[in-house]
Amino acid sequence: MTLTEPASPYLKRISHQFRIALFLGVTALVIGAFGVFRVLFFGDLGNLSTEVPWGLWVGLYEYFVLLEVGAVLSFILLRYGAGIRELDRLGPIIMLTALAALVGALVSIFHDLGQPFRVWRPILAPDFGSLLTWMIWLHIGYMFILLAELWAYRLGRKDIVKKMAYISVPAGAALVAVLGSFLSVAAARPLWNDLLLPVVYLISAFVVGTGVVLLQHILFSPDRGTETYHRLARRLGRWFIVWILVGMFTALTISLVMTYAEVPATAAILRQMLTGDYAWTLWVFHVGLGIALPIILLFWQETFESSRNRIWALLAASGLMIANFLMVPMNVVIPALAYRYDHVRDTLVRFEYFPQLVEWLVMVFVIGLMLVIFAIGIRLVIEPFYKIAVQTPNTGDDNSPDGFDSNIEIKSKDQ
């Protein structure tokens, strides 16, 4: 490792990113605080009704759970399964992203609860025959796992990081499985009951998680500008394509099976998803901007001669897929609730749903809180981790501060 100046360009850049994240986060918290105030003090739950009791906040919760677990599982699969050792130094960024997403998930679902301040009851008086209890306990356990990994990264303890990584795999898989099962056991909802949601959600987690790893590598890698950086970005892009295609194959297979079975209620809800009032969210945002355009960019960038243009294409592909992936849980939750069954004759019962302003404001608040957590994590974990990595020679010892396998060359000029 070559150290040519006390303060590396990467540490300067990460400090700049801290200020940007903190400013955007605080701004979003201020804007969204009015929505939180309306929910907590006036019980304003937006456009929810007795027939559509779950909306944007439940969709956000599921989205952030898939993101938090998917980022960690994908990182571990790529690092230890595929043997991509260059990902070592990206580890703390991935764990910090997962922790911020976990907090975002909990705060999102907190606002959806009718009695949010009773959330302590399943903790102190658990009923382990309830999937809701398992979700809460798994979230708490997963949070402690992420905090332990971040603490190990801060100290440069590779041995602890590796052990916690193996623990986080079954914990994350269990959390996603319970999340999918929570809907699948609802026998009165044909779409949920017919879908293999635990399996679908686990595959979806790997899809979005691989996109997160690619995006975070492009934005935060200390190797930026080097040949290693561009080579790894291209390799991650190919893994991203594979997981998107796997996700598409899974969704297509399940849709064909559901259609072939010709269960009336399930087929009707599926038609509503494809051609009904919410079809634009599926075709425009999820399929168009979230799948088709990223695939085009991922294949197209392989033909680029310019490394810079390839990075921009990979950045756009991963960013588009992650942003529009919110439509996956939304299109699972909303159509199944908004379907008007034939036996319902009361015209006063509302089955339509679109988020109101207070719901969007809470979403802005949640994103702001995640950015603030990310900024704090940069200061408390990321900067100390890279200061140790830059200033300590790599001895190859798992217990040494710089036992992470990446011989990065810190130069005086950020390439």
Image: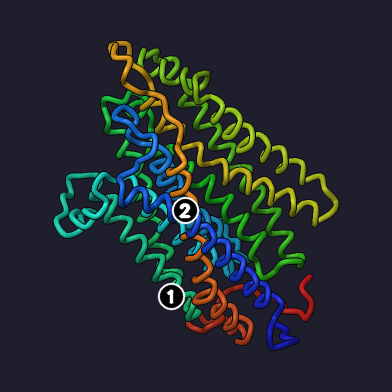
Say what secondary structure mark 1 lies in.
Answer: helix
Query: Looking at the rendering, in which quadrant would you find the C terminus?
Result: bottom right
User: Which residue is the site of mark 2?
Assistant: 32
Mark 1–mark 2 CB contact (< 8 Å): no
Label 1 to label 2, Cα distance in Å?
Answer: 30 Å
Question: From the viewer's perspective, is residue 100 above or below residue 271?
Answer: below
Mark closest to the chain's N terminus, 1 or 2: 2
Q: Position of residue 127 (x, y in %)?
A: 15, 49
The colour mode here is: rainbow
The answer to whether residue 76 is visible is: no
54 left or right of 328 in image: left
Using the rendered view, name the quadrant where residue 183 is placed. top left
Q: Label 1 belongs to which residue?
A: 151
Is disc 2 surrounded by few (<14), some (14 to 19) or many (20+) residues within 10 Å? Answer: many
Please tell me how many numbered marks the rendered image carries: 2
Task: Give me the residue at 29% from left, 50% from top.
Answer: 135
Question: Is the residue 85 above or below the residue 158 in the image?
Answer: above
**Amino acid type at image mark 2:** Gly
**Quadrant holding the N terminus:** bottom right
Q: Position of residue 32 (x, y in %)?
A: 47, 53
Drawn side of residue 408 relative to residue 27, left or right:
right
Which of the 4 quarters of the picture holds residue 217?
Answer: bottom right
Q: Residue at x 52, y 26 (%)?
A: 252
| Residue type, label 1 | Trp
- Local secondary structure at mark 2: helix
Q: Is residue 288 visible?
A: yes
Residue 133 higher or lower than 291, as above or below: below
Q: Is residue 383 left or right of residue 119?
A: right
Which residue occupies the foreground of this view, 275 or 369?
369
